[in-house]
Amino acid sequence: MLKIGILGIGQVSPNLLSEVSRGLVEVFPDSTCKVVKDFLAVPEEALNKKRNQYNSTVILAGIQNFTFNQKEFHRVLGIVDVDVYASGLNYVFGEAYLSGPAGLISLWRLKPEFYGEEPDSGAFKLRILKEAVHELGHTLGLQHCTHTYCVMRFSNSIFDVDKKQTLLCDQCYLTASLAINRMDRQP
């Protein structure tokens, strides 16, 4: 059984974290998902003042440090509401350690309002779930997928996020299931 922790970073609604938790259990049926009581602060050293963005890799390292001090979860997904980027990219929706304990998603560019659209909580929550599943998939060893609608397909824009489903394709599902089964056999 996969044990997932949802960790708020900075100012993130506890209700939103709970909704993500419920959604992940639907996508990963043989899992438990719990919102971590503690919140982490957004690390000041992650801010790139010239870009007015935060380095996702720095934030992700903080999540990984959190995972080292707990034994309750196999994977921890951090959720932050700031604009993030990774080295060589203008922005990212999230980042994760491949086959590692930690992932991160940013809400910032998932909001319809960011693109000048009207607020749409349904579209926003669906985007969040897709990116949460995507980053958790990376922590389970999944690479980017070429199947058009697989949630593990790389998203270069919000249009790509909207196009894909919340589910893994058959091959990615099999790979994720094998990774979860290996966790069950670990002490």
Image: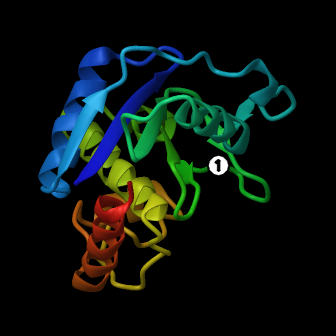
> What residue lies at 30% left-to-right and 66% top-to-bottom?
163
Measured as percent of width and height from the top left, residue 70 is found at 48, 30
Residue in the foreground of this view, choosing between 176 and 152: 176
Percent across and percent down for residue 168 are 26, 71
**184 sits to left or right of 52:** left
Q: For the point 37% across and 39% down, which residue is it?
A: 73
Quadrant (top left/top right/bottom left/bottom right) for the N terminus: bottom left
Q: Is residue 151 above or below residue 120?
A: below
> Amino acid type of disc 1?
Tyr
- Percent coordinates x, y for residue 56 in the rendering: 66, 41
Q: Position of residue 138 (x, y in %)?
A: 47, 63
131 above or below 72?
A: below
Quarter of the image with the C terminus is bottom left
Judge from the rendering whether residue 176 lies leftward or rightward of residue 49; answer left or right.
left
Q: Nearer the viewer, residue 76 or 161?
A: 76
- Residue 113 figure quarter: top left
Read off the residue under disc 1. 91
